[in-house]
Image: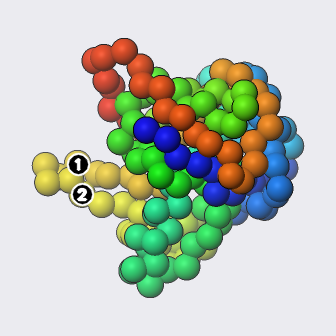
Amino acid sequence: MEGRVIAVARDGAHRFSKEVVEAITIITGLGVKGDAHAGTTVKHRSRVKVDPTQPNLRQVHLIHAELFDEVAAKGFTVAPADLGENITTQGIDLLALPRGTVLAVGESVRLEVTGLRNPCAQIETFQPGLLGAVLDKAPDGTLIRKSGIMSIVLAGGAVQAGDAIRVELPAPPFLPLERV
């Protein structure tokens, strides 16, 4: 499975949306240089309140651009970085990847998929009704979270729009993604 990077973004403050930039630098073990969520321990404010010593499993956030088309069909306008992702992808079903998948991005970056982003109430502030559009129910009634995946950085480097993304699946058995 191969895809590509559509856009990259970062934000040094804890704002909902990030700023699309030409390129980002990803630092091994930390995340995106200059982004508020970079670090070895958790940076998401709600998780810091619970336990600031937790490992940061949310160093780099990825969203599939196909989600934008899906929510557009429901009347919403969403563009790269609007939902706070660092990397917007195309051509890979991110939500179907098993935990532990490695995404080789560009020349040198390697990201290990840790889990699903849990969409929060801030999405409703961004666009009322959007939270419901990024959630769904499976036939068995389980909640499907569509607002992207989270990863940790195994190897850093530069990433920009147009870079290839190669998927390296872990050894079976495949573990499903859970919210992190």
The structure residue drawn at horizontal position 68% and vertical position 52%, both measured from the top left corner, is 162
Query: Is residue 66 shown left or right of residue 40?
Result: left
Task: Check if mark 1's residue and mark 2's residue have beta carbons within 8 Å.
Answer: yes
Quadrant in which residue 25 is drawn: top right
Amino acid of disc 2: Lys
In this view of the protein, can residue 113 be seen by the observer? no
Query: Does 121 appear above or below 103?
Result: below
How far from the left and from the top, in percent, is residue 95?
40, 45
Please name the residue that numbered disc 1 is placed on: 142
How far from the left and from the top, in percent, is residue 72?
46, 78
The structure residue drawn at horizontal position 43% and vertical position 38%, both measured from the top left corner, is 1
Give the structural element (helix, strand or loop) at label 2: strand
How far from the left and from the top, in percent, is residue 125?
59, 73
Query: Is residue 100 shown left or right of residue 35?
Result: left
Please name the residue that numbered disc 2 is placed on: 137
| Residue 66 badge | none
Query: Does 10 appear above or below 127?
Result: above
Amino acid of disc 1: Thr
Quadrant in which residue 22 is drawn: bottom right
How far from the left and from the top, in percent, is residue 152?
62, 28
The way the protein has been coloured in the rendering is rainbow
Q: Residue furthest left?
A: 140
The structure residue drawn at horizontal position 41% and vertical position 55%, both measured from the top left corner, is 146
Q: Nearer the viewer, residue 117 or 106?
A: 106
